Amino acid sequence: MQNYEFKLTPAFCLYNGTAIAEQNGSYIRFLTENKEDSVLHWRLEKAFRKHLDFVVRQKDCGTEYKNLPQIEFSAATHEEVRNCISLLYHENGLTTYKEKMNEDKEKKEAAAVLLLDSILEEARKRRATDIHIEKSIIRFRVDGKLGDYASIQKDRSSELVLRIKLISGMNVLEKRKSQDGHFVYGENKPVFVRVSVMAVIGDEENETEESVVMRLLDTARLPLGLMNLGFSDRQLIVMDSLLQNKNGLIVVCGATGSGKSTTAASMLLERIKQTGNSEKIISIEDPPEYIIPGVTQIKVDKELGITYESALEKIFRQDPDVIMVGEIRDKESASAAIGAAMTGHLVIATLHTDSAPSSILRLQDLGGSEKIINSVLRGVIIQELQHSYGSVTLLSDICIPEKKESDGFIHVTNVPELLKKTGKLIAKKMLLSQENTSTSKESV
């Protein structure tokens, strides 16, 4: 006796979101993702009745096919329909649909792993600090400048983002909320990768995509010496004077990728040289961007309850002389930096502002008292990396608080001649500060 069961092709089932759940002769039950799809129901009923008409005409037809047709429809999820489809065929050497899907999934995952590895390797070769994945475009930030690296297909971009979220410890199913995570890449020379994922509007209506930024922190690197960063001789003298303070707050400011962390770390190394490594220096960072010899470094980890505020409470018992706060980004870190400076410690911190006056306003906006800020602030270092004719130049302005000046600061600027001629906006801004303080800056 032949097998007269009613069958649907996997392609038809996948396209229409349906599958055969069970059947016995003239009885059949279909699973459908959309139970309200009357057109699909009509097509399935018509096909099944036509199949029964053919079967009952066969000589070896069983009695179970000769009863009146009974056709039922049950609602099911997409996953339930797919699992049911996987049982439709497994003959002539063909794999089941489920096995095929698993095989395709493994291939996609392997491709995403190779793609991510190649991107990270190329970023390291180019000494990139950040990798941006924006829809189908991959960009690197090198020497503070963001440039295109590659364009990939949309589906490959989605697989790449999924891979990054997976190894960063994020919820791979969540696409609407921002998430932060991290992972370590490489065995011989590991790189700590800090990951930020944020939902963005897609190209199509009601479509949500994700923007990914990976910060590469090569913890094997040592910060450069202050003399090698591009500061002028006069600025180095001023910075040396700032570092001789026993207490107070020194703020290093600039945009993302301007080298703030490198300058702050180099200042700690310079302080170690000045004192002959006779002081206790502790840094609180989220996370550490350099391994600094002679400095006790603490990584902020909110999941473990290690915040700027809690870490500061603990490190006071460690008898520190100098404290570095990796980045002032919220009220908690601002309070930690100002509080430490008030208690007789020298504090070095970084901040996202573009001028000395705006740095004070930013600290006030984060809850700092103007009176207290003015009492603890020792200096503000403004810097930016400027790209001109294929080279990278440091533009910097060291600002010393001075009430007699128009904006409250004495400025010692460093604007190379080449940039003076190009008319760069930041160069003009620094030159203006220099002209306004031309008489008083000689007293620094």
Image: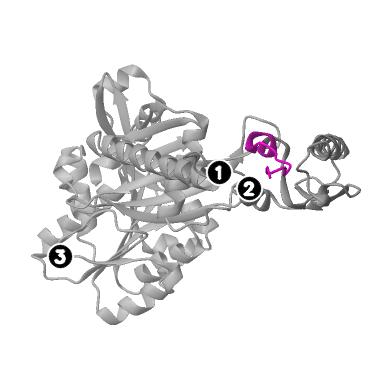
Q: Secondary structure at mark 2?
A: helix
Residue 425 in percent (x, y) is at: 41, 26
Q: What is the quadrant of the N terminus in the image?
A: top right
Q: Secondary structure at mark 3?
A: loop
Which residue is labeled 1 in the image?
Answer: 97
Is the C-beta separation of discs 1 and 2 under 8 Å?
A: yes
Where does the magenta region start and end? Answer: 1-14
Q: Residue furthest bottom?
A: 317
Q: Secondary structure at mark 1?
A: helix
Residue drawn at 59 percent across, 52 percent down: 177
Which residue is labeled 3 in the image?
Answer: 294
Q: Is residue 3 magenta?
A: yes
Compared across the picture, whether 426 is left or right of 345 comes to right
Residue 84 in percent (x, y) is at: 65, 50
| Amino acid type, residue under disc 3 in the picture | Gly
Of callouts 2 and 3, which one flags the residue occurring earlier in the amino acid sequence?
2
Q: Badge 3, how many Cα within 10 Å: few under 14, some, many 20+?
A: some
Which residue is labeled 2 in the image?
Answer: 82
Is the C-beta separation of discs 1 and 3 under 8 Å?
A: no
Q: Badge 2, how many Cα within 10 Å: few under 14, some, many 20+?
A: many
| Amino acid type, residue under disc 2 in the picture | Arg
The image shows residue 247, relative to residue 162, as above or below, that is below
Q: Is residue 71 magenta?
A: no
| Amino acid type, residue under disc 1 in the picture | Tyr
Q: Which mark is residue 186?
A: none
Residue drawn at 24 percent across, 47 percent down: 444
User: Magenta region's main secondary structure?
Assistant: loop
Observer-nearest residue: 342 or 64?
Answer: 64
In this view, the mark in front (1 or 3): 1
Of callouts 1 and 2, which one flags the residue occurring earlier in the amino acid sequence?
2
The image shows residue 232, relative to residue 368, as above or below, that is above
